[in-house]
Amino acid sequence: MTSKLDQLKQFTTVVADTGDLDAIIRLQPVDATTNPSLLLKAAALPRYAPLLQNAIGHCDGDLSLACDLFGASVGQEILKVIPGRISTEVDARLSFDTQATLARAERLIGLYEQAGVGRERVLIKIAATWEGIRAAEQLERQGIQTNLTLLFSFAQAAACADAGVFLISPFVGRIYDWYKKANGNDYTGADDPGVQSVTRIYNYYKANDYKTVVMGASFRNLNQIEQLAGCDRLTISPDLIEKLAADTGKLERKLAPGHAGEARLSLNEAQFRWLSNEDAMATEKLAEGIRQFARDQEKLEALLQAKL
């Protein structure tokens, strides 16, 4: 029998949500994504000790540069074993500074290109704040493609599409977490608020012929993945990929172009901020996500500092 993973791959690009090279080699995804939390975990793996030392040796005491060197080095190793692209994230502490985000993104691309990796194999991950979306808009014009992350609201998705970003990563599991805690309901199937959010965004993009790729992320269980089968891409943790590979049940495609979607929504800054303010879940989860990534970035810097 064909596994659910193989069935999913027939209509969705599967991306590994990990920095663990051994897991990526084992699972053979098309693309891979990293973030500060995953890089912090990778830094504890013996396989990456030489990359840490190299980053320290070439940073001239600049911890932010050391982190970027390490992130780009991990990305380069991953690209050796996948056919597609790696997503590497800008420091979350720059999420409200367009110019600083631009500068850091350009530095990351420069590090890849210095190592002989073309920008066409890299996506720069940026938090989907107003400032981050504006930075992504400029980067796209420069031929640097982006992955807008920590995306929780329809307003964020609409603004990203309007800015012409290459890809968005709506966080299914974290949306589910918020509503489960707020309402005390354990949502399943199509009733899952995270599933509903991605379905709405997907249908909106396809109905309006937006080219921005929808990549569902942050899954808590197999059912969430199954409900989004057919989404452009899904970035999935190694443990859930392995569960999909072990399941030989039938997988039905849930998302496909051709469904009705809302009319195009073009937001200015004031409208974006108001709609974001009105969405308590998105406001809280975006702020929480930025803080979490910032703390893990600081932990990675502390680890590197200790080795200087």
Image: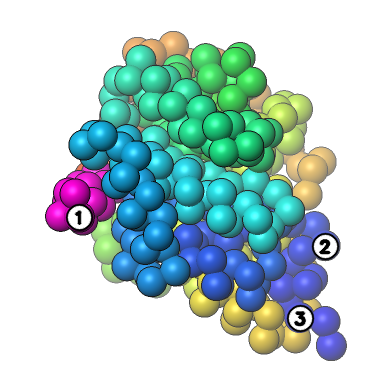
Q: Secondary structure at mark 2?
A: loop
Viewer-side residue, 4 vs 152? 4
x and y, in percent, of residue 256 in the image: 78, 49
| Residue at 29% over, 46% down | 56
Q: If the image is split into quadrants, where does the N terminus sit? A: bottom right
Magenta-colored span:
293-308
Viewer-side residue, 93 vs 299? 299
Residue wearing tag 3: 3
Tell me the distance, in whole angstroms, between the alpha carbons under discs 1 and 3.
45 Å
Q: Are marks 2 and 3 in contact (CB under 8 Å)?
A: no
Is the stretch drawn in magenta largely helix, strand or loop?
helix
How packed mark 1 is, by other alpha carbons closer than 10 Å (few <14, some 14-19, many 20 or more), is few
Residue type pointed to by label 3: Ser
Residue type pointed to by label 1: Lys
Disc 2 versus disc 1: nearer the observer: 1
How packed mark 2 is, by other alpha carbons closer than 10 Å (few <14, some 14-19, many 20 or more), is few
Residue type pointed to by label 2: Gln
Question: Is residue 216 visible in the rendered structure shown here?
Answer: no
Residue wearing tag 1: 307
x and y, in percent, of residue 208 in the image: 72, 26
